[in-house]
Image (cartoon, coloured by chain):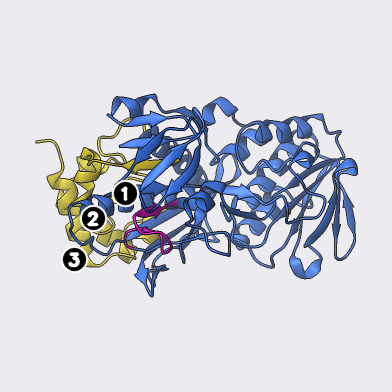
Chain colours: A blue, B yellow
Amino acid sequence: MTLVEANSTYVACPFSNAVIAGLRELDQQKFGYDRLRGNGIDVVHRKVTAVDTKSRSVRLDDGKQLAYDRLVVAPGIDLRFDAIPGYTEASAEAMPHAWKAGEQTLLLRRQLEAMNDGGVVVMSAPANPFRCPPGPYERASLIAHYLKTHKPRSKLILLDAKDAFSKQKLFEAAWKELYPGMIEWVSLSFGGQVTRVEPATRTFITEFGTHKADVANVIPPQRAAAVAAIAGVADQTGWCPVDPVTFESRLQPGIHVLGDAIIAGGMPKSAFAANSQARVCAAAVVDLLRERTPASPKLINTCYSLVAPDYGISIAGVYQPANGLLTDVPGAGGVSPMEAPKSFRAQEATYADAWFKTITRGVFG
Amino acid sequence: MLGAITGVIAPALAMAASPPGAASCLGCHTVNGGDNPVPPIGALEAEQIVSAMQAFRTGARPATVMDRVAKGFSDEEIKAIAQWYASAKPK
């Protein structure tokens, strides 16, 4: 088994919003691949330049070829720098996205730290689908926590290309309680759609007006990352259709696709979901190599968000294949209760932290 | 991240025999515990997993998230998961 990964260090996105808010350091988000090597996996830090589905081989950027019986691809996402006029890769310096953890995360943090008290932070969130549906709202919450603690005369405006979002009622109730008057959420219907940005002045232009920011965070629309196109597994939507039992691509036999890049029906683009999919896919690949038919799986997702360091909320779901997609098992799942004591929110924050430790240890050793 | 599989690896082989849903437990639960507020699933007997899941499902046992998860599994599925984890325990 060979693992091809372009980067020698993985920087985890979950909890990177806490890094932006100064509650955590980026080093706590970083993981290496050495322990996977210890498990007998060949780890190659190269980029994939081509996939030949006929001869079943992968070409790397050093010219080497790897033959495969089964290929598993977890592309992740690319940010679409063609989606919002004015928002290019270069403008991500003035208006960071911080939607891939790393330098962008630190850049947004530094800009918040440099902002004067009384400043205005403007964020924009894309239409569905995108990586981590509750992520923009967790980020708004934790930035508000930073502002309340360090720059209490400041405010945050969140321009949204949607009229509804994940865990919305819980977030809105918590904002009212913890950060009264600090976060203004502007929905699609009330002019939340960003039609253009001007990076030089950190300005967002919407259908209804303009918002000039002291600190700007643009979370642009996304697509499956470039390797999906190289492997021929992305369709015209930019995302990857898969079989919900084996995660084999609907477009390329012998190639399996996982995680944020796939069209997963009811399953969200979360790290927990990707990990659940990976475990099911691994078992299916073993079955297929042994010429057995994989059994129909069940998958779980649990996704925590921090509204404050000691205030966690969650969404959960159980999924099974139905009509060719992963579909919610009726009666299961849902969000944390609206009415709950502080101890309940604190316990969910503790579980969020435990989840991060468990999943990263499970993946990286 | 991209994996070219030309052989069979032991952990995947073990999970291949696991019943529907069992693999996802390991998103939060460890098998053997350690410094973690979430109970290690490998430390439990099959009957303990079954009774806990049933109590979560009915709401008899208070929970933060397990009530919402348990509602997605039938008695048969819970039993199969419980037996699988109990049998995977180091003897």
Q: Position of residue A235 (x, y in %)?
A: 53, 63
Crowd around label 3: few <14 · some 14–19 · many ≥20 (10 Å): few
Q: Is residue A251 magenta?
A: yes
Q: Write down the residue under mark 1.
A: A70
Q: Nearer the viewer, residue A214 or A314?
A: A214
Q: Outermost residue, left direction?
A: B91
Instruction: Give the residue type that dot 3 points to.
Output: Glu
Q: Which residue is drawn at the image coordinates 90% and 61% (left, top)? A: A209
Amino acid carrying label 1: it is Arg
- The answer to whether mark 3 and mark 1 are in CB contact below 8 A is no
Please identify, in this view, whether the residue under mark 2 or under mark 3 is nearer the observer: 2
**Residue A329 at x, y percent in the picture:** 37, 69
Q: Is residue A216 visible?
A: yes
Q: For the stretch drawn in magenta, what is the main secondary structure?
A: loop
Asked which secondary structure carries label 1, the reply is strand
Q: Where is the N terminus of chain A found, in terms of image quarters?
A: top left
Measured Cα–Cα span from mark 3 to mark 1: 32 Å
Which region shows up in magenta? A245-258
x 65%, y 66%: residue: A164
Element under label 2? helix
Q: Residue at x 72, y 36 (%)?
A: A108
Q: Circles 2 and 3: CB distance less than 8 Å?
A: no
Q: Which residue is mark 2?
A: A288
Q: Nearer the viewer, residue B45 or A92?
A: A92
